[in-house]
Image (cartoon, rainbow, N blue to C red):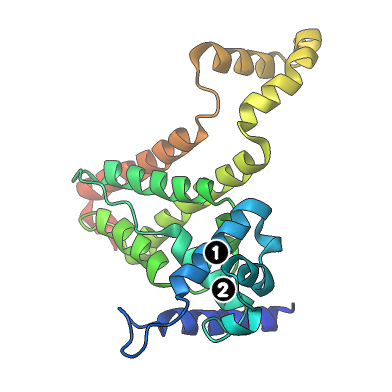
């Protein structure tokens, strides 16, 4: 697919998502629903991977023909968009009023949803227009920063940083389980024999093993990003003019 074709498909998928009515339309109850089709497609992706999702596979799962599904979903791009919006689900809303706690919970919620459906990573990182569900996550994340002295673009950048961190870890974990643990296992004999050549690496792996800090990159990364924002907020509180 060319970039132009991908852009056209993305526009069509967004138009389809946002055209869906809120609540059931009047008239006879349809045999299938968009939610049901999305759940069937998600099940195929969870079991076999995103590449195995097709209108034919989804139709077989629902006990119908792919031509029947085209009445509900016009194509694969629209199906991908519905799958992503459905799999993300309702955003995590932290009860804590403290913005760092709320954003930590927000990032953890994105991580949990993506880890449950690792193919989300590919769909999120494709150029696309967010659907209603994904935009609800934006709204909650931005709501946690409502009182911060940040520009709108900076708030969006912060959410992008958090999502990028989360998605990279989900991609690693989906392919390697516990990546640091797997790396440590693979390097154990090498570092034991050549520790004098790589003393810092050997020491870092040994410390991580001793203090149980291995595969804690989610918490560490989110904490460091938010600590940097906290420092910026404190700086602007001392010098309000630095915001402009």
Quadrant occupied by the N terminus:
bottom right
Residue pushed farthest front?
A: 63
Q: Is residue 182 above or below residue 14?
A: above
The residue carrying mark 1 is: 40
Label 2 and label 1: CA atoms lie apart by 11 Å
The answer to whether residue 243 of the structure is visible from this angle is: yes
Is residue 44 rendered to the left or right of residue 115?
right
Looking at marks 2 and 1 on the same chain, the residue that comes earlier in the sequence is marked by: 1
Q: Residue at x 27, y 51 (%)?
A: 93
**Residue at the (20%, 43%) spot, across then down:** 96
| Quadrant in which the C terminus appears | bottom left
Q: Secondary structure at mark 1?
A: helix
- Secondary structure under the numbered disc 2 in the rendered image: helix
Give x and y (percent) for residue 180: 62, 28
Residue 213: image x %, image y %? Answer: 50, 21
Image-quadrant location for residue 204: top right
Reading the image, the residue beneath label 2 is 79
Give the camera-side residue of 97 and 243: 97
Q: Quadrant of residue 88?
A: bottom left
Is residue 55 shown left or right of residue 223? right
The residue at 64%/32% (across/down) is 179
Q: Nearer the viewer, residue 228 or 203?
A: 203
Q: Which of pointers 2 and 1 indicates the residue nearer the eye?
A: 1
Q: Nearer the viewer, residue 188 or 160?
A: 188
Whether residue 119 is visible, yes or no, is no
**Label 2 Cα crowd, 10 Å radius (few <14 / some 14-19 / many 20+):** many
State how many labels appear.
Answer: 2
Quarter-of-image position of residue 139: bottom left
Q: Within 10 Å of the Cα at label 1, are there few (<14), some (14-19), or many (20+) other Cα atoms?
A: many
What is the x, y in percent for residue 147? 20, 55
């Amino acid at each position: 697919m060319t970039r132009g074709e991908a852009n056209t498909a993305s526009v069509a998928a967004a138009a389809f998502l946002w055209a869906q009515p809120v609540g059931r339309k009047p008239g006879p109850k349809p045999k299938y629903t968009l939610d049901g089709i999305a759940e069937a497609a998600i099940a195929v992706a969870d079991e076999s991977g995103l590449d195995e999702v097709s209108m034919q596979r989804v139709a077989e799962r629902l006990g119908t023909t792919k031509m029947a599904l085209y009445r509900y979903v016009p194509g694969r791009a629209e199906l991908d968009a519905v799958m992503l919006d459905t799999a993300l689900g309702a955003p995590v809303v932290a009860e804590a009023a403290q913005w760092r706690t709320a954003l930590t919970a927000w990032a953890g919620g994105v991580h949990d949803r993506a880890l449950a459906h690792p193919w989300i990573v590919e769909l999120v990182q494709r150029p696309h227009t967010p659907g209603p569900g994904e935009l609800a996550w934006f709204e909650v994340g931005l709501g946690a920063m409502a009182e911060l002295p940040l520009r709108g673009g900076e708030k969006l950048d912060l959410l992008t940083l958090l999502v990028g961190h989360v998605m990279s870890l989900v991609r690693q974990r989906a392919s390697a389980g516990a990546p640091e643990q797997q790396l440590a296992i693979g390097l154990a004999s090498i570092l034991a024999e050549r520790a004098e050549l790589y003393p810092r690496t050997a020491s870092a792996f040994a410390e991580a093993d001793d203090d149980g800090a291995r595969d804690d990159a989610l918490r560490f990364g989110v904490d460091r990003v938010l600590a940097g924002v906290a420092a910026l907020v404190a700086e602007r509180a001392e010098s309000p003019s630095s915001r402009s």
